Image (cartoon, grey):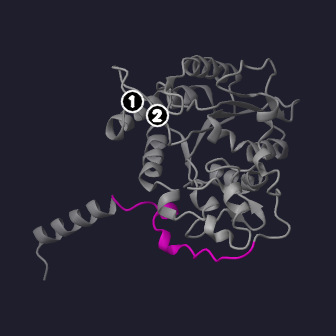
């Protein structure tokens, strides 16, 4: 017979342990099937010769702001241009990866879509340090501030926001930060951004960052035509469950709906570079437009789910 005091301790321990269990959506890669090796499909889309250019439309019309180019004067609106219902996509290039799916949603729902993204300018209100050029991007906070003000004017029904977990930033001393200090700066910065988006929008949907590859996928596939599984990336290297958990927590704390796309993209372990005959990535971390458009249905289902 268990005494009342012992039962209380056992229950408390059980609750404590359960609080550290990750949600089922990204809990354990052992539930995923193994990636089977095979030659590249004959009907591969897009073909390897053009996959690098299989990018969302805002790349081509300059509505995706580049670090070294001035902003376009175009309105950067898509979907049903005559609609009085507005939705927004906001963030960096990882956010732009979702454009094909969200544009399809806008066309289906007869909504006007504003695509507001900038290369290497993550949505969190933090200094944007370009680790490739070792330069602080002074135009990023200017663009971010102006864009958030624009969203407040648009008053969208829905705002989709996303950003890479692979960012770099600095502290008040100008030092590039790592680990806990980097995370703390991000937590404070994304909270400030989400507060502004919540105030401006009917609903904010925070899309967690996507699994990434350790390869430049098109290049890898080109030399592994007979065994494309060689271009797979293990689940543990493609994802960051701790970061996804943090994103989910911050979204909930700030009143946003969180959507985890991990298992829409990584359906095996290792994660496949292909989804059927579709190439998933145009490089190591950006989705091909051909694949991304197929994510409209799961994105909408997750957006409208009550869980």
Density class for disc 1 (Cα within 10 Å; few <14, some 14-19, many ≥20) is some
Residue with the most extreme bottom position: 1
Residue at x 74% of width, y 74% of height: 39
Residue with the most extreme front position: 223
- Residue 177: quarter of image: top left
Residue 104 shows up from this direction: yes
Residue at x 13% of width, y 78% of height: 2
Q: Main secondary structure of the magenta part?
A: loop
User: Is residue 236 toward the left or the right of residue 302 in the image?
Assistant: left
State if disc 2 and disc 1 touch (CB < 8 Å): yes
Nearer-the-camera pick, 19 or 54: 54
- Does 35 lie within the magenta span? yes
Residue 112 shows up from this direction: no
Residue 36: x and y in percent read: 64, 77
User: Label 1, on which residue?
Assistant: 176
Of callouts 1 and 2, which one flags the residue occurring earlier in the amino acid sequence?
2
Marks 1 and 2, how far apart at CA: 7 Å
Q: Is residue 54 above or below residue 25?
A: above
Q: Quadrant of the C terminus?
A: bottom right
Residue 284: x and y in percent read: 62, 51
Nearer-the-camera pick, 76 or 195: 76
Q: Secondary structure at mark 1?
A: loop
User: Label 2, on which residue?
Assistant: 168
Residue 288: x and y in percent read: 73, 50
Residue at x 83% of width, y 58% of height: 47
- Residue 305: quarter of image: bottom right
- Does 31 lie within the magenta span? yes
Residue 199: x and y in percent read: 56, 26
User: Is residue 108 toward the left or the right of residue 2 in the image?
Assistant: right
Which segment is the magenta one?
20-39
Q: Is residue 297 above or below residue 132?
A: below
């Amino acid at each position: 017979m268990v005494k009342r005091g012992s039962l209380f301790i056992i229950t408390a321990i059980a609750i404590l342990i359960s609080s550290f269990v990750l949600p089922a959506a990204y809990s354990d890669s052992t539930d995923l099937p193994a990636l089977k090796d095979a030659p590249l499909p004959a009907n591969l889309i897009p073909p390897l010769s053009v996959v690098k250019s299989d990018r969302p439309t805002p790349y081509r019309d300059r509505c995706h702001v580049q670090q070294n180019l001035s902003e376009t004067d175009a309105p950067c609106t898509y979907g049903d241009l005559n609609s009085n219902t507005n939705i927004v996509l906001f963030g960096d290039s990882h956010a732009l990866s979702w454009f094909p799916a969200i544009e399809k949603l806008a066309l289906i729902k007869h909504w006007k879509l504003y695509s507001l993204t900038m290369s290497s300018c993550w949505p969190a209100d933090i200094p944007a340090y370009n680790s490739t050029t070792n330069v602080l991007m002074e135009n990023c906070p200017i663009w971010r501030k102006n864009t958030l003000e624009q969203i407040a004017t648009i008053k969208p029904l829905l705002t989709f926001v996303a950003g890479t977990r692979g960012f770099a930033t600095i502290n008040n001393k100008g030092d590039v930060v790592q680990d806990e200090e980097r995370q703390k700066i991000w937590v404070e910065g994304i909270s400030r951004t989400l507060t502004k988006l919540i105030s401006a929008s009917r609903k904010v949907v925070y899309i967690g960052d996507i699994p990434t590859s350790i390869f430049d996928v098109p290049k890898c596939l080109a030399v592994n035509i007979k065994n494309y599984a060689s271009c797979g990336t293990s689940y543990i290297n493609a994802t960051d469950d701790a970061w996804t958990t943090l994103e989910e927590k911050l979204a909930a704390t700030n009143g946003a709906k969180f959507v985890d796309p991990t298992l829409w993209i990584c359906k095996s372990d290792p994660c496949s570079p292909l989804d059927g005959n579709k190439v998933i990535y145009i490089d190591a971390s950006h989705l091909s437009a051909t694949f991304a458009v197929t994510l409209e249905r799961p994105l909408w289902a997750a957006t409208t789910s009550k869980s």
